[in-house]
């Protein structure tokens, strides 16, 4: 089965085309990006499996429909395209950020599913609209092709009520659908499953902690193959210190700052989501590499941001070990988790007491997928590069094969 995976942001469209034969293998056939959608001229890049060469250029993409049309043109381009006359794909799989409690699985897009995704816009006003625009654009450009929605929140729907409920009055919880939902679910599930494969153990028997550390960061306790707890909440703001987001904080801070500085909800939202975190604390950047470089030069605020980043991670890992009553494996992924050797050492060294025995040589080896603890370590630690697009492709295939959608 060939699946076109689409990830639409407000001004970008990323796509990957996978061939997924019956034997569980997967081949990436083509990938590309349309950026700066909505401007006079948008940028595209495209590459397919026949040549490593990346093709870049300008396209007209005033909206997502024109961006999908540009993607189709690239795939059919006489000189560089993968297909000759017709795009031979079996389905599109779309990343959809928020599915609230309405989706515990991926779903074939029907009018009812579309309406349910629209219902989640209240909680995800920035993310769900471009995701829906991508779905509508693909329906228009590829009429009749099945469209599947794959939700960032779905994997976390297995969290029990005492984990996902906030300590608010019942009517607030019910009326406004306020609770912990969690994000990066596709990534956490992918790396946890892949790690279980690498461990040659049954996913359903393991207690794992997956750390997705990128510009946005979250950590998940995966107990017996299911998400048991995760650090992000109603929105991606809760939890770890992130590139530009605060993570955990006394909620009264928000009221206090809004009152003191007379900020509107929108201004406060920008402060919390875009001006805080590693960038806000360090005053340097949201880019971890730049902050690390500054800290090496003796920049005190950069060092403080790094110390806060590490500390919260250690604290979350410790709390998840307690919450699950143990842990078999800790998995690192995302730009920071996959590439930052010293960060992994700094986080795992204080966790020796739970049975993590770091192997410095393994930690600094150039392998992409690797175990980084010693043989015999009671808790093993791993690096597993995430592949959300492949997971979306596989989930899309599963839905098409099942031939049904799940809406509660
Ligand atoms: P996003 O959440 O936007 O997908 P990524 O997962 O690509 O982000 O992660 C981006 C982050 O990874 C940046 O802060 C970048 O500095 C960091 N990063 C990438 N390589 C390294 C490295 N070798 N050491 C430390 N941080 C790194």
Image (tube, rainbow, N blue to C red):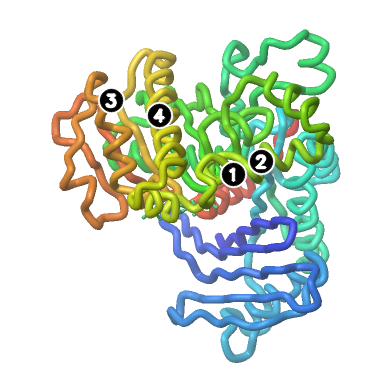
Label at residue 19 = none
The answer to whether marks 3 and 1 mark residues whose Cβ atoms lie closer than 8 Å is no
Q: Name the residue beneath numbered marker 1.
A: 244
Q: Residues within 10 Å of mark 3 (few under 14, many from 20)?
A: some
Badge 4 marks a residue whose secondary structure is helix
Q: Residues within 10 Å of mark 1 (few under 14, many from 20)?
A: many
The answer to whether marks 1 and 2 mark residues whose Cβ atoms lie closer than 8 Å is yes
Label at residue 273 = 2
Label at residue 311 = 4
Disc 3/disc 1 C-alpha distance (Å): 27 Å
Please tell me which residue lies in front, 388 or 171.
171
Residue at left offset 48%, top offset 38%: 188
Image quadrant assignment for residue 406? top right
Residue at left offset 34%, top offset 32%: 330
Q: Position of residue 401 (x, y in %)?
A: 60, 47
Mark found first going from the N terminus, 3 or 2: 2
Residue at left offset 74%, top offset 57%: 10
The answer to whether marks 1 and 4 mark residues whose Cβ atoms lie closer than 8 Å is no
Image quadrant assignment for residue 60? bottom right
Mark found first going from the N terminus, 2 or 4: 2
Disc 2/disc 4 C-alpha distance (Å): 20 Å
| 188 lies above or below 291 | above
Image quadrant assignment for residue 7? bottom right
Nearest to viewer (mark 3 / mark 2): 2
Badge 3 marks a residue whose secondary structure is helix
Residue 135 located left or right of residue 372:
right
Label at residue 351 = 3
Q: Residues within 10 Å of mark 2 (few under 14, many from 20)?
A: some
| Ligand 1 is within 8 Å of the C-beta of the residue at disc 4 | no
The answer to whether marks 4 and 3 mark residues whose Cβ atoms lie closer than 8 Å is no
Nearest to viewer (mark 4 / mark 3): 4
């Amino acid at each position: 089965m060939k699946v076109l995976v689409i990830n639409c942001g407000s001004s970008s469209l990323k796509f990957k085309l996978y061939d997924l034969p019956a034997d569980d293998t997967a081949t990436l056939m083509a990938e590309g990006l349309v950026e700066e959608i909505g401007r006079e001229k948008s940028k595209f890049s495209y590459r397919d499996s026949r040549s490593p060469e990346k093709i870049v250029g300008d396209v007209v993409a005033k909206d997502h429909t024109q961006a999908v049309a540009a993607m189709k043109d690239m795939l059919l381009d006489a000189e560089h395209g993968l297909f000759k006359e017709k795009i031979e794909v079996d389905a599109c799989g779309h990343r959809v950020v928020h599915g609230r409690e309405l989706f515990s699985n991926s779903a074939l897009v029907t009018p009812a599913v579309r309406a349910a995704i629209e219902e989640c816009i209240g909680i995800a006003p920035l993310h769900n609209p471009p995701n829906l625009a991508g779905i509508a654009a693909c329906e228009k450009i590829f009429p009749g092709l099945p469209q599947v929605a794959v939700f960032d929140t779905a994997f976390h729907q297995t969290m029990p009520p005492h984990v996902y409920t906030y300590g608010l009055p019942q009517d607030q919880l019910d009326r406004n659908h306020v609770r912990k939902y969690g994000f990066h679910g596709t990534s956490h599930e992918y790396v946890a499953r892949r790690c279980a494969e690498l461990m040659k153990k049954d996913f359903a028997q393991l207690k794992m902690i997956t750390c997705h550390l990128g510009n946005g960061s979250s950590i998940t306790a995966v107990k017996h193959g299911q998400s048991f707890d995760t650090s992000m909440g109603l929105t991606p703001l809760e939890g770890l210190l992130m590139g530009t987001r605060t993570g955990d904080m006394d909620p009264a801070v928000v009221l206090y700052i809004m009152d003191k500085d007379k900020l509107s909800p929108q201004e406060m939202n920008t402060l919390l989501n875009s001006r805080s975190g590693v960038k806000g604390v360090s005053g340097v950047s949201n880019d971890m590499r730049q902050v690390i470089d500054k800290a090496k030069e003796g920049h005190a605020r950069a060092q403080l941001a790094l110390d806060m980043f590490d500390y919260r991670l250690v604290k979350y890992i410790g709390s998840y070990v307690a919450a699950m009553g143990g842990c078999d494996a800790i998995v690192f992924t995302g730009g920071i988790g996959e590439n930052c050797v010293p960060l992994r050492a700094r986080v795992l060294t204080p966790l020796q007491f739970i049975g993590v025995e770091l192997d410095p040589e393994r930690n600094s080896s150039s392998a992409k997928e690797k175990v980084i603890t010693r043989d015999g370590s009671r808790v093993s630690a791993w690096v597993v590069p995430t592949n959300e697009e492949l997971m979306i492709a596989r989930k899309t295939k599963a839905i098409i094969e099942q031939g049904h959608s799940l809406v509660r």
